[in-house]
Image (cartoon, helix red, strand yellow):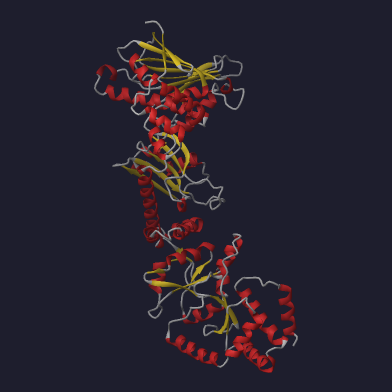
Amino acid sequence: MSAEKLQFQAETKRLLDLVVNSIYTNKEIFLRELISNASDALDKIRIESLTNNNLADDFEPEIFVIPDANTKTITISDNGIGMNRDEVINNIGTIAKSGTKDFLDKIRESSNAAAQELIGQFGVGFYSAFIVADKVELITKKTDNPAVKWTSDGAGEYEIEDCDKDSRGTTIILHLKPEFTGDDEYNFTDVYEIERLVKKYSDFVRYPIKMNFEVKDKPEDEPTIEIRTINSMKPLWTRSKSEITREEYDEFFKQQLHEWESPLEIFHVKAEGTVEYTALLCIPKHAAPNLYYSDYEAGLQLYSRHVFIMDKCKDFLPDYLRFAKGLVDSPDLPLNISREILQQSREVKVIGKALEKNILKQLGKLLKDERDKYEAFWREFGKSLKIGVYNSMFDTKLKDSLKDLLIFPTSKEKFSTLAEYVARMPDFQKKIYVAVGKDAKAIEQLPQMEILRERGLEVIYLTDPVDEFAIDVLRNYAEKDFQSITRENFELDDAESQKNKAEVEEIAKSHEDLLKDVKNAVGDAVHEVRLSSKLKSSAVCLVTGENSPSLSMEKTFAAMNNPMFKAVQILELNPNHAVFKKLENLHAQDKNSDEFKNLCTTLYSLALLIEGVMPNNPAELANKITELLTK
């Protein structure tokens, strides 16, 4: 039969225009698409060979790629199922689906999820050939059918004719546009560039992908052709976990994720059911330097049927698990025409929730069974889980999943879970005591710590800025409220402390004028001045209002250029300290004297310094202290 010229179906022509000019922005993925089609053709003939004995004897599946700089072509061939004439017309000249016009209209009009789902229903990867080629030839032969040749420049029509082909399968010849032959950014006629693309996108295709390489034993020798298989065909994640050694896992992650050391923890998950997927994830030993910055690219590698789809898919794991690395391979994910994942799909949510649950379960097991290893994880990635708690403000289920994974340094332990802390609490202690500071040393020097040490009470140290935010979201643990020792409502629950409190309240009644005048001397910087029953050797301390931001929070917000969050400061004085006696004497002599006022403002500045806050005028403070020392 002579060559026959046919017009593309109108919708097909419109689709070609979209493919070339809009949908595929990454030019190099044409090779992935055509190799995937070849793999599908081999899948079909492999299945047919199970029942067709004539095929079973001679079937050795392979895909061959031939870049040719001389002819400026690249050829992809397979010995798969092939097509007859009608199938070529139906599969390539026509999109044989109902509702085609509607779905194309929606693609043009918007990029909403509904349109993207419609795109995902069409297997149109073949048309990506026209991104890089100004002419495409397809030669194909199906068993016991004449071979067929299809030719088009993608403009609006194609030619189809019978031809000669010795064996079953399909060969596609791309006549490359000039910009893809080495003159500009791309050179798809270069053997090693094609080898790189195959390893990047199609390394785990189950069939051998072969290429010809010129080799010389000696520089002066004529080159000979060596056929090499350039893909591994061995996705580690498809093997049974019991067959994989730790060394194999380690080497895989080093190569796949470009890690320089073995991972801290590995997760290998296979799931079947409504959504089938395999996930191979790891937690690196060390956090990336920019892990908590906006320029960090989180996400898992995505594969579909062992074919690489994208490198950083952010839709599987919540942001607080951004430290996890690895891949997901699923045949069930709806992809758009560019093989990009559809973010709002049910399948993505199902896989994401399962992965999140699995990671948290494994971390819980690590905490229980390998404490040293978990603490190493915590030092690198603990902030992420605390961010997760902070983000769980309106998600009780997530909050409950994370709270038992939190560990903190305390006044008695290097690290303690909340459950372990509660188990050590004496019977009279009703609340969980926490203290905020830049480090353990700074917290230990807080005036309030002295009485807690004296009573043998344990304090959780919050040394990371996010700690306090996480604790505020939790509010309580095991029905015991968290209590900051630098809040105005902090008080001890034992009988001796209650007795001391009552005594100090009596002293305060007889010193109302003194406290009022100290407040006037300090000014609006403090909301209130009062006496404290919780100070031992310290003369003064600052606490904050029960419902206000803490001083630490105020500093954090200020560092974020958000100065509107101000702590309500309360200055507490120790009525049993010698400085208070001096304050009493100066007040009795002349409450308006500079000496009295200077002592009041100096005490406030000292309280700020204890909290790690620099007074507004350090030089003035130094002069006042010098003056006081010389009197």
Q: Does residue 84 appear anywhere in the picture?
A: no
Q: Does residue 246 appear anywhere in the picture?
A: yes
Residue 501 in the image, given as x and y percentages of width and height: 48, 87
Quarter location, residue 406: bottom left
Residue 451 or residue 485, whichever sits in front: 485
Q: Which residue occupies 60% across, 90% down?
A: 513
Left or right position of 25 against 609: left
Q: Quadrant of the C terminus?
A: bottom right
Residue 25 or residue 250, whichever sits in front: 25
Residue 619 or residue 109, whichever sits in front: 109
Residue 384 in the image, given as x and y percentages of width and height: 48, 56
- How many numbered marks have been drawn onto this rendered protein structure? 0
Residue 445 in the image, given as x and y percentages of width and height: 58, 75
Q: Quadrant of the N terminus?
A: top left
Up/down of 165 relative to 458, above or below: above
Left or right position of 631 against 550: right
Residue 60 in the image, given as x and y percentages of width and height: 35, 21
Judged from this view, the residue extending furthest toward the top is 2
Left or right position of 138 against 182: left
Quarter location, residue 149: top left
Up/down of 22 relative to 274, above or below: above
Q: Which residue occupies 57% across, 88% down?
A: 575
